[in-house]
Image (cartoon, rainbow, N blue to C red):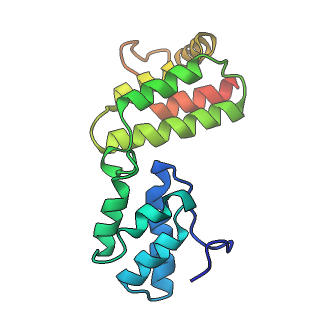
Amino acid sequence: MPGRHHPYAPKFDGTPTLLNVFFDDVEQLAQAYSLSDMDKITWTVRYAPIEDRELWEFYVKGYTWEDFKSEIRAFYPGSDRARLYSLDNLKSLTETYANEPMDTTDRFGKYYRAFCKIAYYLKSKDHISDRETSAYFMRGFDSKFRSKVHEQLRAESPTHHPDDPFHLSRIYSASLFIL
């Protein structure tokens, strides 16, 4: 296994949403080295952030790999994949982006990726519908850009009923056309 400062060593900076990625990286490396659960845990602790290492060391002995991961996840609220994102996260994202002009493809791309990450997760948990997804996505645009997108969508589909939302992919295409 590579030492903690080696470029290929798994890294974790304490960000809860990245803990599972870190565990996945350790598992992949441990599998390549045919490590036992105990060795996997020992190496994981070696790769832990210095400020958390002492805490993680309490879980080295007497734990399976799955139990160890569960115990460590408890110290990082937000790392649990079952409750990764909420509607509040989506609302917050759209409010943040709506406060600035959507004037470049770079900004639009960042918004689209951030939005899809949260929205697709919520859809996978049946917490949001396609209709709501489209509505939330439009809320992330400043009012001027939102109006332009509406105009473009109406021009592309003049017979589309105003009460029926456009699919996210159509909004995406219209937005890029405008930019």
Inspect this view and state whether residue 166 appears. Answer: no
Q: Where is 73 relative to 149, above or below?
A: below
Q: Quadrant of residue 39?
A: bottom left
Viewer-proximal residue among 99 and 2: 2
Residue 170 x, y percent position in the rendering: 51, 30
Q: Where is 71 relative to 29, above or below?
A: above
Number of marks in the rendered image:
0
Q: Which quadrant is the C terminus positioned in?
A: top right
Q: In the picture provided, is 2 more to the left or to the right than 135?
A: right
Q: In the picture provided, is 5 more to the left or to the right than 168?
A: right
Viewer-proximal residue among 50 and 3: 50
Query: Which residue is at 62% across, 78% downward?
Result: 3
Inspect this view and state whether residue 126 appears. Answer: yes
Q: Where is 13 relative to 98, above or below?
A: below
Residue 171 x, y percent position in the rendering: 53, 27
Viewer-proximal residue among 150 and 55: 55
Q: Which quadrant is the N terminus positioned in?
A: bottom right
Query: Which residue is at 56% across, 32% downward?
Result: 172
Q: Quadrant of residue 62?
A: bottom left
Residue 155 x, y percent position in the rendering: 57, 16
Query: Which residue is at 43% across, 24% downward?
Result: 91
Q: Quadrant of residue 144?
A: top right
Q: In the picture provided, is 54 more to the left or to the right than 105?
A: left
Q: Residue furthest bottom?
A: 34
Query: Which residue is at 52% across, 52% downward?
Result: 14
Q: Where is 58 relative to 151, above or below?
A: below
Residue 103 x, y percent position in the rendering: 71, 22
